[in-house]
Amino acid sequence: MGTADVLPPPLLELLSNSLVLHQFCPYLPISGLLNLAATSKSFHIFIFGTPNVFRYLDLSTIRGGAVDFAPIDAGGEVWRSERMDEAVTEEDFFAGPLRGIFSTLRRRGVLQDVQTLILDGLSVPSEVVREIICDSPFNVRILSIKGVKNLNERKLKQVLKYACRLGRPEGTPKLRGLYFFGPEHRRGNSSLSSVENAVASFSPQGVTTSIGAQLGTQWNQRSKHALSSVMEPDADPWYRPSGILSFADRVAEWADVLSVCRGIIAFDGILCRGPRHDILSIMEDPTGKTEKSMTNGGFIAPASATVVLGPGGCQVCHSAPEGLAIPGEVPTDYLPLIEPPPRHTSSLQVAQRTPSGITLSTTPLLLARCKACLVDRWCEGCNKFWCEDCYQTNETSTYTQMQKVETIENSGGPGLRMGIKVHLGLCIEDCLVGEMYNGAGSGGMWG
């Protein structure tokens, strides 16, 4: 028999190679694995008897896990003609499909092997999340519930706080990472989707309350976000100068949960590490009125980071008082989870890995803050930032917008003589001057 007549190895023999199996299984849907196991007794024994075959489980594509009905009896109308058990709550009803899938996987001896679970877009009530986090049949370490339906966020917050309480049993919770804030993954043209998301999610704040004064900055920011999304489709928004995050409003409401879960459960959102959140730096002077604390503002409660300043840091020192976060060199609670969830491991360190859009020759640097830490020191137009060590805001930081305008006009120039870097949310040297020229004249921004 010649070389050309040699048959390829059988599929079972090929999958018996642990390296091939490890790379192959995460890309095969659960239905494919079960169908493969049903082809013969040998495949059945191999699939269900080999560890880590079901370690990565993506249920987001299963139609049986979705519930497309409206809430039960919404508006006082009869929801269905069939009679239902009065003991079944609305949450139990919407959890039914997913619990049915979990029950089937448990009977097949698969559920306890799942360590990375993807439930994006399905009907996932908060009670189901509680079962995944707290109940013994589950060993999930990485969970993704982006864009899920019928989820009570208030109850989910309570579940997470309870799971991370001080008196919790040792070794709990098993969950190490939760993908929740980011948008659900959209299949298709990634570049077009990125542009659409960037433009649709933009919501300018802080320049001024006037629509006319926001117009120029709004379109500049939209153009910048859309262009950067097309040019860097693989770069994660946390590691480029993205400005305001697309899910900023949502993550801002979860600061208390992120604070309780710090160091226990990581999220695709992080807390701001600005110096104003550090009570020790504010209390350097017994009176709490040191020159630095007075000029840069007092202590503020923990807040979520919603503005990404980029790896360049401060315009003067190219860093920040809290330092730039580097994966592998800082605690895990300094870093967000990076999209997409890892397929070949359930390690938290890998989930916080270096984004694919950053080359090996570039050190990944992350700097993100809340808006309260960026008042009068961040430009919404060009994303420039001046840190507390290089630029201390003067007494005008507590003025109203009208008082600031009068002070700048009386100084004989647009803040240059007073050393002001940012006014009305725009940097004095570039963006504010450009807005004044673009809007000058009859019917313009300042005309």
Image (cartoon, grey):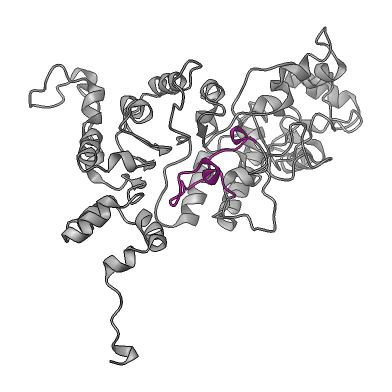
Task: Looking at the picture, tell me which residue is in the foreground, 52 or 313.
Answer: 52
Looking at the image, the residue that sits furthest to the top is: 287
Q: Residue at x 25, y 26 (%)?
A: 71
Q: Which residues are magenta?
A: 331-354
Looking at the image, the residue that sits furthest to the left is: 82
The percent position of residue 169, horizontal first and vertical second, equals 44, 20
Q: Quadrant of residue 98?
A: top left
Q: Residue at x 25, y 40 (%)?
A: 65
Task: Looking at the picture, tell me which residue is in the foreground, 285 or 446.
Answer: 285
In this rendering, position of residue 237 left or right of residue 51: right
Q: Quadrant of residue 211?
A: top right
Residue 279 can be seen, yes or no: yes
Q: Residue at x 29, y 34 (%)?
A: 123
- In magenta segment, residue 312: no
In the rendered view of the protein, which quadrant contains the N terminus?
A: bottom left
- In magenta segment, residue 343: yes
- Number of marks in the image? 0
In the rendered view of the protein, which quadrant contains the C terminus?
A: top right
Residue 399 can be seen, yes or no: no
Task: Looking at the picture, tell me which residue is in the foreground, 417 or 340.
Answer: 340
The percent position of residue 136, horizontal first and vertical second, equals 33, 29
The percent position of residue 128, horizontal first and vertical second, equals 31, 28
Dominant secondary structure (helix, strand or loop) of the stretch shown in magenta: loop
As displayed, is residue 25 above or below residue 302?
below
Q: Quadrant of residue 66?
A: top left
As displayed, is residue 51 above or below residue 69?
below
Looking at the image, the residue that sits furthest to the bottom is: 2
The percent position of residue 94, horizontal first and vertical second, equals 24, 29
